[in-house]
Image (tube, rainbow, N blue to C red):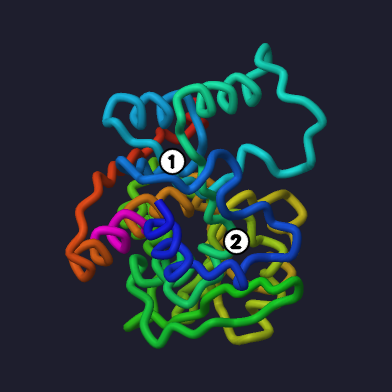
Amino acid sequence: MKEIIRWCEKLAPPSCAMEGDNIGLIVGEPKKCTGAVVALDVTAEALSAAEQNGCNLLVVHHSPIYQPIKRIDTAEPRGKLLARAIKSGIAIYVMHTNLDFAPNGLNQHVAQMLGLKNIRAVSAPDKVSYRIGVLPADIPARDFARRIKERLSIKSARLCGTGKIKTVAVCTGSGADLLSHAVLHGADALVTGDVRHHHAMECRALGAVLIDAGHHGTEQTMVGLVCGFLKKMMVKSGKRTTIVPLYIAEPFENV
């Protein structure tokens, strides 16, 4: 397990994380790894996948423990999941903002998936590092939103703004607060998730384009990114460990 963790930290160095982010091995101990499940969140489905595949490590993006907790109440959902993981001997390793911001991390990965070229890292306050890249040619904002749906395999995206765009900023998860920063650094549009009303009003005032592809929609690709990297490292090392990708369905549905 120490080697799997070392590989995870090669992809997403802990030093890239925002201050106070609860990353790393948060449940269990680094004993011999029998396999790893990679998922966005710690869920009953993820634990079942680990149990069914004989894996004793769960690698996730979102920590089930973020704020300090005083007790583990097994009658409530989070406590039940943590107790099950401990009882089943499943360690939980978290790659959060360190994976988002790393040089070859999630922001870079999604920017490449969307077809951006000449991608550069842009630093913002609080150690945030998002990406800005250029499309091969100008494209209408609505067409680019449709491309995002296709490339990220999501059912819907929200679009604010019109016109053609060429230079695009990407911040997976919740990055709408970066809109003015991105525009200042040359972006015509920002792709992110968790966009709120005041972000849309700011977008209109700036004459920019804002595309909300969802928190889940922009981050679910971490499963393929992490699995692909771990498998590549196994090939290089000559070692073999079961790596199971688990894509969990978008929790929201359009009605």
Q: Quadrant of residue 77?
A: top right
The residue positioned 68% from the left and 84% from the top of the image is 184
Q: Quadrant of residue 233?
A: bottom left
Q: Is residue 24 magenta?
A: no
Residue 159 in view of the camera:
no
Residues in magenta? 226-231
In the picture of the structure, the residue carrying the numbered disc 1 is 58
Q: Is residue 228 magenta?
A: yes
What is the C-alpha distance between the residues marked 1 and 2?
17 Å
Amino acid type, mark 2: Thr
- Circle 2 packing at 10 Å, graded few (<14), some (14-19), many (20+), is many
Residue 33, position in %: x, y? 35, 45
The residue positioned 63% from the left and 49% from the top of the image is 194
Give the total number of marks visible in the rendering: 2
Residue 10 in view of the camera:
yes
Residue 103, position in %: x, y? 48, 77
The residue positioned 60% from the left and 45% from the top of the image is 26
The tag on residue 134 is: none
- Which residue is the extreme one toward the front? 31
Question: For numbered disc 2, what is the local secondary structure?
Answer: helix
Amino acid type, mark 1: Leu
In the picture of the structure, the residue carrying the numbered disc 2 is 97
Please indicate whether residue 72 sits to the left or right of residue 31 in the image.
right
Q: Of the two numbered discs 1 and 2 on the same chain, state the one appearing first in sequence.
A: 1
